Image (tube, helix red, strand yellow):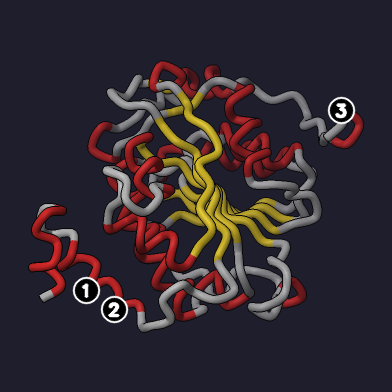
Amino acid sequence: MSVSQIIRLPPLPSIRDLIKLYKLRAMKELSQNFLMEPRLISRIVRSAGSVKDCEVCEVGPGPGNITRSIIQNMPSRVLIIEKDKRFTPSLELLAESSPVPLELIFGDVMNFNLEQMFNEDNKMEWEDKCPQIHLIGNLPFNVSTPLIIRWLKAISERKSAWRYGRVRMTLTFQKEVAERMVAPIMTKERSRLSVMCQNWCRVEHKFNIPGRAFIPKPNVDVGVVRLTPLKKPIINLPFDIIEKVIRSVFSYRQKHCIRGVE
């Protein structure tokens, strides 16, 4: 995207200044880590593909680092879902300054239904191209895996955001989790998560972010993953059945895997 195609936000305090101004700190109990490097933030948004004229839902924006980059890429609308109300002043300031509509919703994404959140004009048939809707998020580590499992179930049932079609997701995970998500068959990284993700989505491990890029610095690196729902799942059975079988299989060591199937 050329410089002329990027929206320039009105002058705003830097995220670092906002964190100091409102005395914000990442809460360990919420597994919060702030990404402060603009180059890496922009790369996350680019990994989603073009968001120009699209609706973008960002999960867990925190003080708004990634949100700023999303806005600069000219979406038609931005919806942000945040659990921690300490970020209200920072996010409201960004919403007031945004040249594109920005809606702020406080709530726990684990209990949030995206069924009615997007424009019906963006709805596509499942077999058609992906709708102009994106989900983007720098997820807390304690939420990322349970959330993707919940969303895979919604994909299998074509509910929540996936009522609108094959909505794409660009999300962060611990590097080891990202590697398991894309692990090929017959590799040591292959896991329950590998099978579940790859059964319903094309999974791409786009790049890694070193832990030192975050504040506070986590003990692990982070992987950015893009998931695009498949037109047809590899195994076309109900989600609960597949999950039960896969969970049973991977509860045994690999050499005894046949016992899990039995």
Query: Alpha carbon of mark 2 to alpha carbon of mark 1: how far?
Result: 6 Å
Residue at the spot 65% in from the left edge and 31% down from the top edge: 42
Tag 2, which secondary structure?
helix
Q: Is residue 208 found left or right of 72 in the rendered image?
A: left
Tag 1, which secondary structure?
helix
What is the x, y in percent for residue 101? 73, 53
Please say if the residues under marks 2 and 1 sit with CB atoms less than 8 Å apart.
yes
Quarter assignment of residue 43 = top right
Quarter assignment of residue 6 = top right
What is the x, y in percent for residue 31? 30, 37
**Dot 2 corresponds to which residue?**
240
- Are there few (<14), some (14-19), or many (20+) residues within 10 Å of tag 1? few
**Dot 3 corresponds to which residue?**
3
Residue at the spot 51% in from the left edge and 34% down from the top edge: 63
Tag 3, which secondary structure?
helix
Residue at the spot 30% in from the left edge and 32% down from the top edge: 27
Residue at the spot 38% in from the left edge and 27% down from the top edge: 221
**Dot 1 corresponds to which residue?**
244
